[in-house]
Amino acid sequence: MRVRKRKGAEEHLANHPQYVILNPETAKGRWHEIFDNDNPIHIEVGSGKGAFITGMAVKNPDINYIGIDIQLSVLSYALDKVLDSAVKNVKLLRVDGSALTNYFADGEIDLIYLNFSDPWPKKKHEKRRLTYKTFLDTYKQILPEGGEIHFKTDNQGLFEYSLASVSQYGMILKQVWLDLHASDYEGNVMTEYEQKFSSKGQAIYRMEAQF
Ligand code: SAH
């Protein structure tokens, strides 16, 4: 997701510490305390402008959500959505998905969503793909035994790669959709990219993979 640098993004994030966790290292192992409940915690890595995480939080008030993005400006737009919807069960983190073990204790996260992750189509950039094996190592550590990754994309190349990557890792492919919107899958919450690509007639791929 390419967005222009937003003026005041940093201040905007800093002004809402109830939603934006500014010293995430100190949150490791304390997330239930931060949410002030024992509900499950689901994260989206690469949450973009936040339509998915906010939509999910509105729909599922008994689940805690954390939207994670590496881009400051993008995260500040996600904060706008969180503020507009006045949800209590969302936090936002500006960190790199490759370093999640710095911010989450072993097994602290119940489910990981990846939506429309950057495809990095060149072979030399394989290591940056969010379904590359080192990312899977990280996800495995912060999820419980048998934890799951739910992944959506419009990008056929990234989807093919990810199917192979998770299966080579030894994960179980629980379910695969080659055209999510034409399927009987219920309760889908669309992301910004999903709205954009599906309105152009592109099929949306989805998988649920389990460690
Ligand atoms: N999920 C959103 C955005 C997809 S674009 C949607 O579907 O609309 C991919 C997003 O992932 C971008 O906002 C980008 O900044 C973020 N991203 C890419 N690599 C990342 C990483 N290593 N850690 C955290 N976020 C990352």
Image (spheres, grey):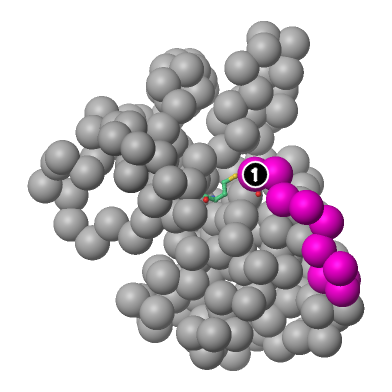
Reading the image, the residue beneath label 1 is: 1
Residue 130: where, in percent of width, then height? 61, 34
Instruction: Judge left or right: residue 88 versus residue 154.
Output: right
Give the SS element for disc 1: loop
* Residue 24, quarter of picture: bottom right
Residue 116: where, in percent of width, then height? 50, 40
Q: Nearer the viewer, residue 182 or 125?
A: 182
Magenta-span inclusion, residue 5: yes
Labels in figure, total? 1
Q: Nearer the viewer, residue 127 or 168?
A: 127
Instruction: Judge left or right: residue 5 versus residue 61.
Output: right
Q: What range is drawn magenta here?
A: 1-10
Q: Nearer the viewer, residue 197 or 86?
A: 197
Write the residue at 65% across / 23% down. 120
Residue 10: where, in percent of width, then height? 87, 71
Q: Nearer the viewer, residue 181 or 45?
A: 181
